[in-house]
Image (cartoon, rainbow, N blue to C red):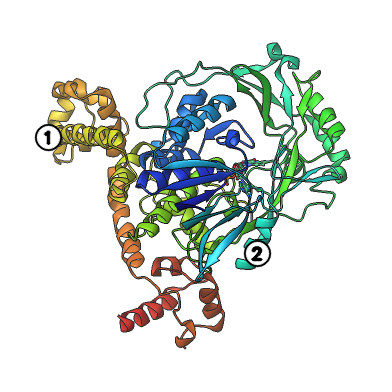
Amino acid sequence: MKHFDVIVVGGGHAGTEAAHAAARVGVRTALVTMRRADIGVMSCNPAIGGLGKGHLVREIDALDGVMGRAADRAGIQFRLLNRRKGPAVQGPRAQADRKLYRQAMGELTEAQPNLEVIEGEVTDLILCDGRVAGITLADSSEITAGAVILTTGTFLNGIMHIGDQRAAGGRVGDAPSIRLAQRLKDLEPRLARLKTGTPPRLDGRTINWDILESQPGDEDPVLFSFLNRKPYARQISCGITHTNEATHEVIRTNLQRSAMYGGHIEGVGPRYCPSIEDKVVRFADKSSHQVFLEPEGLDDYTVYPNGISTSLPLEVQEAYVRSIRGLEAVTILQAGYAIEYDFVDPRALTQTLELQAQPGLFLAGQINGTTGYEEAAAQGLVAGLNAAHQVLGQETVTFSRTNSYIGVMIDDLVTRGVSEPYRMFTSRAEFRLALRADNADQRLTPMGVAAGCVGEERRVAFEEKIEALAAGRALLDSLVLTPKQANERGLRVNQDGTKRSAFELLSFPEIDFATITAALPELEAVSAEVAEQLSREALYANYITRQQQDVEAMRRDEHWEIPADFDYDALPGLSKELRGKFARAKPQTLAQAGRVDGATPAALALILAHLRQQK
Ligand code: FAD
């Protein structure tokens, strides 16, 4: 019988990142997945990143994960979203060539030491002395391990819907995972259903591109990985078109034939990624919705029409798609469909993504109620790191709302749970001015080095960068001007008698690095990259200083750990309702308790007093 330290089940976005993270830490890792060739498959849109999601990819990269590097190799159109807004809410995004992404992920996986890929369907878990100790495959063979990570995506009891037709499947072309779903239900009864959908795929050769608006990528592409500077692949443009009244009329007339509206689906769908049926119903006053026509690859004529996912019957899909400008004669290559699947209430997990009720079993990705490749990969990394650390007997690695979007997501999931598929937004992060995509490495790479998941190449590149930033910052701090001197050099500042360093002057929105260098030529020695980073830091420095108190308060509360068996009934001052809520949510820290629905300062003070007594 084979034995590994960590087994990861599922080679999707969560699974690959989990397997790589565990292997980077140095433990023997097996990635068991239905088909080796499917590693790196994108079930839905051929794109990585975006608002909030781009932050997650940068954070994964800062911890030496693989998603950013694969996306850079496969990117055929890079765009920094929200470019005109402040750096805190800018999100790197790349449209990816599906084939190149798969190839890149396959090669990175092949090259990763300590990592073996095994093909097969996992049908059961081996339990031993109250711990998960391995897996059983469909051919009845068994593999043992110190820890197991499940990342089965949309496959658990997956059912696909097109109109009133339904078929069992994990995604188009793949069988569902039914026996494993049953086993999981036995271990953790808090399973429920969610749904998501995908649009029809179009034949690009039948699109009238000549009459459509075209959207090129950025002239100066911003990549995901801190190790990369420019795209690998040829860059292309996308097309833009719009739905219209005729499109909406077709959809309205056939609404009851949609799987979603015809009552065939019980799962809840993503509110922020609505189907075209949802858009027409929920935004009834809008007569048009934008549709991006995204080529799926450089040598692939398949086009992904972003914005019109559906579960209507094929003939209705054809009718509404052909009512759209430029798509009048389009051929549908694959029908859009909706998929329903089981997920585990993430409140059943710890912050390391281990199932509370089942030591040694970690869950990551869509199985935890999230949607999106980036959310899945970020969870995979957390689970992979922690499974490896557990096997090695090392400390857990947890992320905080104060240091990362990863921390925000995990905390949201395990504290609040989900009522619809969870996706990341910048608005979820209360400390977003400090948690920018551009400084993910400064926030997290040292943590990754300490956790043993950052390789030598990145560590050295990071240290060099930090040295250059420190030297640039020291120079900016050393150049100080009085308001009068500033004005004489063309820098408009208040004549309030306050001397300001060049760094402080850079915090004025109207003073950029070029302006300040014209006034202080000593700054010509600073490289463009360092100048750009220091400008961003200066811009937010005042706000971040003001936020520091809140950050400190949250960190203090995070240090107060609440034992899993904490008896809320022993706090008579707590209302019955709150006692029930805390007992169900099982917050692991005082900070988490504060985010439980209905938690009051008085309730937290009671818990804190009790924790102090127990110390
Ligand atoms: P997946 O990428 O699904 O990977 C799961 C992997 O596990 C697969 O490789 C599978 O073969 C393997 N596996 C499953 N069961 C077993 C088993 N028993 N044994 C061995 N291997 C197993 N995201 C969005 O952000 N927006 C959208 O609009 C959107 N629409 C979607 C529409 C559809 C139809 C689908 C299918 C997905 C959609 N997604 C969307 C979700 C996105 O694809 C997922 O969030 C993401 O792929 C989740 O990653 P994952 O690693 O959790 O799972």
Q: Is residue 191 above or below residue 601?
A: above
Give coordinates of residue 390: x percent, y percent. Answer: 39, 59
Residue 480 — which label? 1
Q: Is residue 134 above or below residue 249?
A: below
Q: Quadrant of ligand 1?
A: top right
Residue lying furthest front in this view? 1
- Kindly state the secondary structure of the residue where label 2 is placed: helix
Image quadrant where one finds the C terminus = bottom left
The residue carrying mark 1 has its beta carbon less than 8 Å from ligand 1 = no
Q: Are marks 2 and 1 in contact (CB under 8 Å)?
A: no
Dot placed on the residue nearer the N-terminal end, 2 or 1? 2
- Kindly state the secondary structure of the residue where label 1 is placed: strand
Give coordinates of residue 136: x percent, y percent. Answer: 60, 55
The three-letter code of the residue at mark 1 reads Val
Q: Is residue 26 above or below residue 323?
A: below
Numbered disc in front, either 2 or 1:
2
Viewer can see residue 189? no
Task: Count the numbered circles shown.
Answer: 2
Q: Dot 2 corresponds to which residue?
A: 185
Give coordinates of residue 50: x percent, y percent. Answer: 51, 36
